[in-house]
């Protein structure tokens, strides 16, 4: 997943981290829903952790979207982007 060759920007690893934070937020949110029946400190901690992971994922992906001017998880497939890729990596 981590590239050792030339890339235009090194943000792809951070995008993967944001995606993993989003997945962890969903997982902890599900656990939090189940733990709500007991109303314990564990339920509160899990809910706060889920919210924290969601906020972190949203912050990472929003900043990257503004910085890269396209979705950080899905690469652009425009004609210019394809030509740039072919020129840099296939020539």
Image: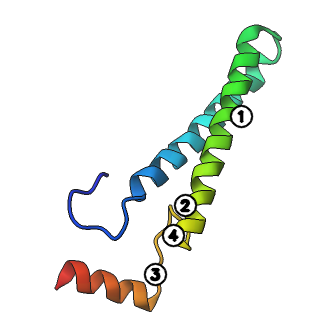
Mark closer to the observer (3, 1): 1
Cα separation between marks 1 and 4: 26 Å
Nearest to the observer: residue 33 or residue 83: 83
Mark closer to the observer (3, 2): 2
- Near mark 4 (Cα within 10 A), the count class, few <14, some 14-19 or many ≥20, is few
Q: Which residue is mark 1?
A: 51
The secondary structure type at the circle numbered 2 is helix
The secondary structure type at the circle numbered 4 is helix
Q: Dividing the picture into quarters, in which one does residue 69 lie?
A: bottom right
Q: Are marks 4 and 2 in contact (CB under 8 Å)?
A: yes
The image shows residue 80 at horizontal and vertical percentages of 41, 90
Nearest to the observer: residue 41 or residue 34: 41
Q: Which residue is mark 4?
A: 68
Q: Which residue is mark 2?
A: 64
Cα separation between marks 4 and 3: 14 Å
Cα separation between marks 4 and 2: 6 Å
Nearest to the observer: residue 9 or residue 54: 9
Circle number at residue 77:
3
């Amino acid at each position: 997943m981590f590239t050792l060759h030339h890339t235009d920007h090194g943000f792809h690893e951070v995008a993967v981290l944001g995606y993993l934070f989003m997945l962890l937020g969903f997982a902890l949110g599900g656990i939090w829903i189940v733990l709500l029946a007991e109303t314990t400190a564990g339920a509160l901690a899990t809910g706060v952790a889920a919210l924290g992971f969601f906020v972190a994922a949203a912050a990472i992906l929003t900043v990257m979207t503004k910085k890269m001017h396209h979705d950080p998880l899905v690469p652009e497939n425009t004609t210019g982007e394809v030509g740039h890729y072919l020129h840099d990596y296939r020539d």
